[in-house]
Image: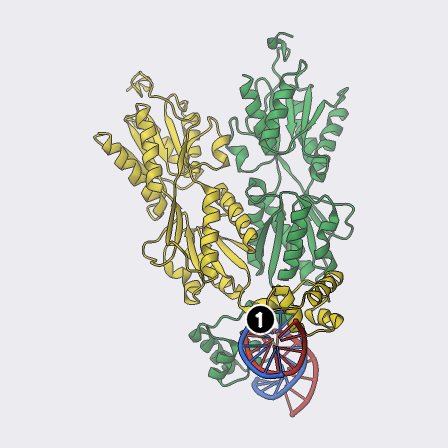
Chain colours: A green, B yellow, C blue, D red
Amino acid sequence: MSATIYDVAKEAGVSIATVSHVLNGKGKISRERREEILRIIERMNYQPSAIASALTSKKTFTLGLLVPDISNPFFAELARAVEDEGQLLGYSLFICSTDNQDRKVESYAALLRQKGVDGVIVGTGVGDLSALRPLLDRTIPVVFVSREYPEAPGIPSVVSDDYAGGVSAARHLLALGHRRLAVIAESEAVSSSRERVRGFRDAALAAGLPSFGKLVRAGGIREGRLQGLRLLQEPDRPTAVFCCNDLIAIGFIQAAKELGLRVPADCSVVGFDDTILASVTDPPLTTVAQPIERMGQSVVRLLVQAAEGRGAERERLVLSPSLTVRASTAPLASRLPGLAEGE
Amino acid sequence: MSATIYDVAKEAGVSIATVSHVLNGKGKISRERREEILRIIERMNYQPSAIASALTSKKTFTLGLLVPDISNPFFAELARAVEDEGQLLGYSLFICSTDNQDRKVESYAALLRQKGVDGVIVGTGVGDLSALRPLLDRTIPVVFVSREYPEAPGIPSVVSDDYAGGVSAARHLLALGHRRLAVIAESEAVSSSRERVRGFRDAALAAGLPSFGKLVRAGGIREGRLQGLRLLQEPDRPTAVFCCNDLIAIGFIQAAKELGLRVPADCSVVGFDDTILASVTDPPLTTVAQPIERMGQSVVRLLVQAAEGRGAERERLVLSPSLTVRASTAPLASRLPGLAEGE
DNA sequence: CTGAAAGCGCTTACAG
DNA sequence: CTGAAAGCGCTTACAG
């Protein structure tokens, strides 16, 4: 076993209370004593047990992060930002992949509660909010990131302005002359996706489009490809598509290639998120960039504020996304789209 | 506050020892008593404090994972596998991104020690192994994944057979008729990269190549691109390149495109890892696939064995990589490569 | 400025 | 089969 506070106290000829005080900078300790004790701590290579102090102080300096899947680049990048900001503020991070399943959400929630985390960041989809009860029951602070649940009043959230993101995607495509649009959204259950679609629709209608275009749903690459194959083989196939995340967009581009269509010449594509994937595809993806790093920083700050009893200053933080134009979008070709296919 | 073991004991009219016993399945408790107590636990929604039990039992059921960067897809995918296997065995996961800096490695090591983790998985580069001293001093079990340190005897590791991976990359390119090869390796400090290069070289020489080709170094996409620009503008530019990870390969492909060269027509590219990125690039990347999921599972099992005192069965587990052929490699064009550029 | 003592919520011999 | 009691390594009023 390694040194405990008792060993240090004995060595220094003081009580453990005094050692504890110099450790935590509490109370008044004479400068000489303090320095003497610090020296001994150093020499004995003493490190206080976080477990013992957690048991008494009720603080673990640990946070939980619930995401659908840590191997999904968006959440991996978010996790990195969360980890860094947590580290800065002295908090460690438990990572929990839920696959958006309430069962896993609830089991992780119970686990995190048992572990005594000081707060948890929820970036995962939660079908039934009661899955979070183990946390809320014990009044462990919770903050949502990238998702919101209006049914959960009083729980702060950090999101990007998804509506505005949808608007900017639509305006970009409209400015390029596209009129025959389509949207591939995520599940209706995902609040952020709903907002993105709403923004896109409003902007399209505001531009005088008679109709808003086809709307289909997908989750990741595979489904994006499937829906792409379908959309692109319809007689009135769209000349531009808005995909509610980069993965879907990637699947869509794959579908286009398989059908011998060129992106953006035959169909423009806009994604959402701007993860590393967007810069790597061919063509590089025009996409609505979420400020992932700032989102991560902000949730942590909000959560730590709540955890430390300094009431969160705001309940809801909305960060602005920005359109990153790469090469998957282009002006509408002058020929009538679709003609080549023999309509 | 929520219920403690005392509340349950009082409610059940037994001692806390008895409650503890039924909780942990220890000792002999009469079936009726057990069931009665279980019922009360259920009713009171009692969950034992992991902190208190950690303080007495010296087990936290928590592991640490040191990686260079959780937002790097390879490590994100590995982390997912580690998390899942840990979860299965009852362990939670602290995630620690070190950016391969010894300073951060050491500070995380000290932190994990304070938190009392039962073991740590090291997938990060460590320049000076003494950065791990906080762990080793306290004899906290450590296992390496994807890297090895021969200087650290007695520490188990799980790696893929990097040498064999390098061989298979070379054989693939040789079989396609390529003779003018190049390699973009990671830093010399990275053991896995060294082995990959060694395998590649041996296979090339064994095939009768007079020389093994150019060797340059890079870390990620940016450097891969830079080195690509350089390599591809030399008079005797290679017709095929082996990149020691997918990120480098992606950067290389970008460079080729910028120079107006086609992959694979003008230059074949083989990567290493087979992360999600490899399937998303254009062309999709031929790459040596590491069995990421199995690696994650295996390290966790090895580590938990060590943590639970069941001596690790083996000190070193080597998993076989396998070549995934996609579209970034092709037979050597019949024309003399490079002629087009006016050599 | 410093110390004695209680207490955090468990587990674990040990005794019966 | 069950309980009393010690102990894990800290923090925190409280007293002096």
The residue that label 1 is drawn on is A52
Q: Residue at x 31, y 16 (%)?
A: B334
User: Would you identify the image quadrant in which residue A110 lies?
Assistant: bottom right
Q: Is A33 situated above or below A122?
A: below
Q: Position of residue B273 (x, y in %)?
A: 43, 38
User: Would you identify the image quadrant in which residue A341 lies?
Assistant: top right
Q: Position of residue B319 (x, y in %)?
A: 39, 43
Q: Nearer the viewer, residue A180 or A219?
A: A219
Q: Residue furthest top?
A: A342
For mark 1, name the chain: A
Q: Position of residue B37 (x, y in %)?
A: 71, 66
Q: Which image quadrant: the N terminus of chain B?
A: bottom right
Q: Residue at x 75, y 63 (%)?
A: B44
Q: Which image quadrant: the C terminus of chain B?
A: top left
Q: Amino acid at mark 1?
A: Ala
Q: Position of residue B327 (x, y in %)?
A: 43, 25
